[in-house]
Structure formats: structure tokens, C-alpha cells
Image (cartoon, rainbow, N blue to C red):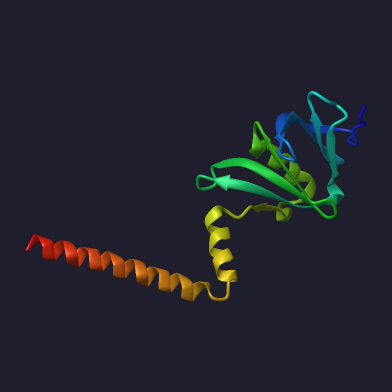
Amino acid sequence: MAQSQNSSIDLTIKATSFHGLTTYGDVLIGNKAFEFYNEKNPEDYIQIPWDEVDHVAASVMGGGKVISRFAIFTKKNGNYSFSVRDNKAALRAIREYVGEEKLVRSPNFWYVFKHGLAAIPQAPRLVCDAFKKISQKVSKKASEKASRKK
């Protein structure tokens, strides 16, 4: 049986871990660590001490009203994604231990797409060429349509 690192627990809540296969269990947020325990197998657990947390990224949607999931990025062991029943309450409890400066928004799809294109050196020229071709096709079809009506 796994031994909890926490001496006091601030929040216990049902959760889903997206590390590998999706697993269901309980998240315990306490004074020493963030802990996830699988409900079917107690030996399958994740314990992240607060001093190992680099930052926490929240997936924010709907203009900041809905938080669908969050990921904890550690200094050495990668990242772990979770979704709990009340993500806002969990992030508020986490904020007490990691600090507000380590809570960040995860980039949305359009941000990643835009910056991915900008990272390609020839992307602006390629995008402009593609838009020119599309606009030429549209104007050609419009002129053909207009000539048919006459």
C-alpha cells in the first residue's frame, strides 16, 4: 500500500489521470505533495512533491469560464495531465503551495497553429501565395458566373 507524503489534506476529489491510459481515481492535495491514487489499484499512484513542480498549465475555454483540465510540469520527470470534478477548486488549492506565478494558461489551438507557422521561415510567403491562388480562383469563378448571366 502506498504511503501518503502529506500530513494534512486540503482537498480530496474524484479525478481522471491522462498519463498513459486514462485512469480514474482520487486526487489528494495536501501540505507536502499532489497525489493521485487509482481507485481500482492502490499501488498505481502518482505523488508529486511541491518542490518538484515547475509550473501548472490550465486548459481554459469559454473566455476563462471553463477549465477542462490541467497539467503539472515537473522539473525532472515530465508532465502529468489531470481533470477533476471541480478544476477551479483544485487549482485554488494548488495555488496555495506553488504560488500564483507558477499557474499559467496552456496555449490554445490557434496560438500553437499561428506560432507553428511563424516558426517556418518561408511560411509567410507560402501563406500569401496560397491566399493569392485562392482569391484568383474565386474571382475567376465570379467573372465566369457574371458572363453566363449576360
Q: Horizontal and vertical percent for residue 79?
A: 76, 49
State which quadrant residue 35 falls in: top right
State which quadrant residue 107 falls in: bottom right
Side of 107 relative to 6 (left or right): left
Q: Nearer the viewer, residue 132 or 7?
A: 132
State which quadrant residue 146 falls in: bottom left
Locate the C terminus by quadrant.
Answer: bottom left
Q: Horizontal and vertical percent for residue 104?
A: 67, 53
Q: Name the residue located 73 percent from the left edge and 36 percent from the top edge.
A: 21
Q: Is residue 123 positioned above or below 64 on the image?
A: below
Q: Nearer the viewer, residue 109 or 35?
A: 109
Side of 140 relative to 32 (left or right): left
Q: Name the residue located 50 percent from the left edge and 48 percent from the top edge.
A: 63
Question: In the current view of this chain or complex, which residue is farthest to the left?
Answer: 150
Side of 141 relative to 106 (left or right): left
Q: Name the residue located 17 percent from the left edge and 61 percent from the top edge.
A: 145
Q: Is residue 140 positioned above or below 41 on the image?
A: below
Q: Horizontal and vertical percent for residue 131?
A: 38, 69
Locate the N terminus by quadrant.
Answer: top right
Total marks in image: 0
Side of 34 relative to 2 (left or right): left
Q: Horizontal and vertical percent for residue 14?
A: 71, 28
Q: Is residue 136 positioned above or below 98 on the image?
A: below
